Amino acid sequence: MTPQAASRRYALISFLTWLPTGLYIPVMVVLLLDRGISLTAVAALGVAYSATVMLLELPTGGLADVIGRRPVMIASAAASLGALLLLGLSESLWLLTFSAVLRGVARALSSGPVEAWYVDQVPAEDAAELTRGLSLGVMASSAALTAGTVAGALIPFGLDVSLAVPVLIAAGADALRLVVTLVAMPEAKYEASSLRSILWGVPSTIASGARLAVRNLALTRILMVSAGMGVTLAVIELLTPAWMAELAGSAERGVLAYGLVAAVGFAADALGSSVSMPLLRRLGSVRAVCRTGYCVSVLALAGMAAASAMTGLPGILAAAVAYLLMFVGLGMAAGPLSQLLHSQVTTAERATVVSVQSLLLQSAGALGAVSLGYLAGVTSPLVAFLLAAIALAVPAARLVVPDPVPSQSAEACSGR
């Protein structure tokens, strides 16, 4: 398989992995409330999902490094398919709880393996192709979330059908992902095949990946940037909906405004990913692209802080522009940052380290949501947005990881 073919398959599987999420997110809460599930129970289902993801993040990453990326991604698609069928068809709280746990299992299983599989297909010295493919995967994921969110919101109301329809369509997308993964993700058989070798290999791989994350200073700095992104995203997701409702003058208008802003954010992330390669050709350095992207995001967060002091339509427009620019910057840096991360690890612990990155992003996000959310309540959103900007700016400024040694194609890409 050529690296270009691998990048197309990676983008397709990434798209199909995130499309179901986009489809069910706009309707899930309202669907559950419509079935008589209390708001407290809905929140508890969210906690069950998040706790499952965080609990299994490292074990599933280690599993992918021990038994292979392909079987883990197949299991992820199957678990998500079952979870969404339960969510779309069941009214029992126990079955819905099982659905939430299954969705958490599916999310943890999908965190890292397909990216690790793609990186394994590309020669380590082909830095330009690796950056292009990783950016293409980020762009495909963001495009899937954009399309899914818009479709998930429009289908029930535009076609006057049940709120469960987008969820069932999402299940169909997972069934397609299962088939595509079986066909389009070939992989050599891994050595660990017995239950004993798996039970021994997974903890050993997790320990190896964790030690690497702590002892490798360059990798630690990359992971700290991910933690800063976790804080930033959590604060945005927590504060923006209520802020939009306040600016719009009613909860209903606020929901519509936030839905549109969120869709724009996903599209902006895809746009940022699409310009990362032209920017690499101009700047000639993966690290410089990362810093440029994060600089845009930090300035956008400062803009959101300023917009939080505004009211009415000007406030909504200023917030929307800042929100868009923040995601353009994050999308711009996502692929290059992934390349820097993979340049510090080997195949043996690649998926594990990506899971460490995901776990740090989620953990920092949870801590940031609680602490900065409280701070925003007792002071103002302006303070929370500024602190989120600092949480991203500080580790991004310390991102001094050397660029991977460029190949001839990378040198051509960078214009040297």
Image (spheres, grey):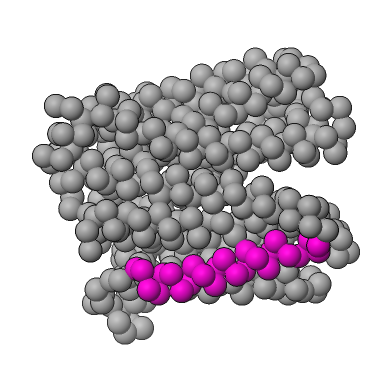
Question: Does the magenta segment cover residue 167?
Answer: yes
Q: Which residue is drawn at 33% across and 38% down?
A: 336
- Identify the residue shown where x is 65% and y is 15%: 306
Where's residue 124, x and y in %?
Answer: 18, 50
Residue 298 coordinates in the image, percent (x, y): 50, 23
Q: Is residue 2 left or right of residue 158?
A: left
Q: What's the magenta bit mostly, secondary-structure-wise?
A: helix
Considering only vertical position in the picture, is 406 above or below 57? above
Considering every residue shown, the one lying at the far left of the view is: 408
Q: What stretch is highlighted in magenta?
A: 161-185
Position in image of residue 62 (x %, y %): 37, 64
Quadrant in which the C terminus appears: top left
Q: Is residue 305 above or below residue 71?
A: above
Q: Is 224 situated left or right of 370 in this image? A: left
Q: Quadrant of the N terminus?
A: bottom left
x, y percent for residue 327 = 52, 33
Q: Which one is in front, 27 or 231?
A: 27
Q: Quadrant of residue 112?
A: bottom left
**Quarter residue 11 falls in:** bottom left
Asked if 244 appears above or below 345 in the picture, the reply is: above
